[in-house]
Image (cartoon, grey):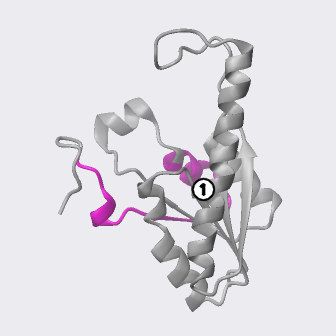
Amino acid sequence: MYRKILAPLDGSELSECTLGHLMEVAKGCQVPEVVLLYVVEPYHKGEMHYRDRYLSEEDIHKRDAEEEAYGKEYLARVADKVKKDGLSVKTAMAYGIPAEEIISYAEDNDVDLIIMSTHGRSGVTRWALGSVADKVIRHSITPVLIAAPRSCRVSLTSGADEN
């Protein structure tokens, strides 16, 4: 049934919580190809930097290049973990708005299933901050498996993992 599974990762431990599910589904369904996707969201001129100053064009290009280099290294490291379980893994990078790039990649590359995590936000926090996973679920024509293992959820009150 599944020939290609897409696993979007954002560099966080929470996004990696899906790897166990990814490996089990891929092995159980004998999926020939797994794709790990990292999306670089470009920093746009005119946005405030976290240190409350605007960035120059040079600083923006430097930041984007650093993010791209990080993404490549990160994907290689995670791919090595997944390959150790005997899966055929491909890595890919995209540039743009994460939810849009995930959906676009899935549609353009004949992906049969997207497996991704949610950061465990709920209620007002989810509404205020939005969620890449929510947007993918709502707009993707590709089936989406959302994994939010209890051990990976972040408590909104303490910032610590829930038990």
Task: Tell me where residue 108 sits by quadrant.
Answer: bottom right
Residue 138 among magenta residues: yes
Asked whether 129 or 55 is in front, the reply is: 55
Which residue is drawn at the image coordinates 64% and 49% (left, top)?
A: 71
Residue 107 placement (x, y as % from top left) = 77, 58
In the picture of the structure, the residue carrying the numbered disc 1 is 74
Residue 117 placement (x, y as % from top left) = 46, 58
Asked whether 91 or 140 is in front, the reply is: 91
Which residue is drawn at the image coordinates 53% and 9% (left, top)?
A: 53
Badge 1 marks a residue whose secondary structure is: helix
Residue 148 placement (x, y as % from top left) = 38, 62
Can residue 50 be seen by looking at this rendering? yes
Residue 18 placement (x, y as % from top left) = 47, 67
What residue occupies the far right of the structure in this picture? 108
Which amino acid is tagged 1?
Tyr
Q: Is residue 146 toward the left or the right of residue 123 in the image? A: right
Which residue is drawn at the image coordinates 28% and 64% (left, top)?
A: 150
* Mark 1 surroundings: few (<14), some (14-19) or many (≥20) residues within 10 A: some
Residue bounds of the magenta highlight: 133-155
- In the rendered image, the quadrant that contains the N terminus is bottom right
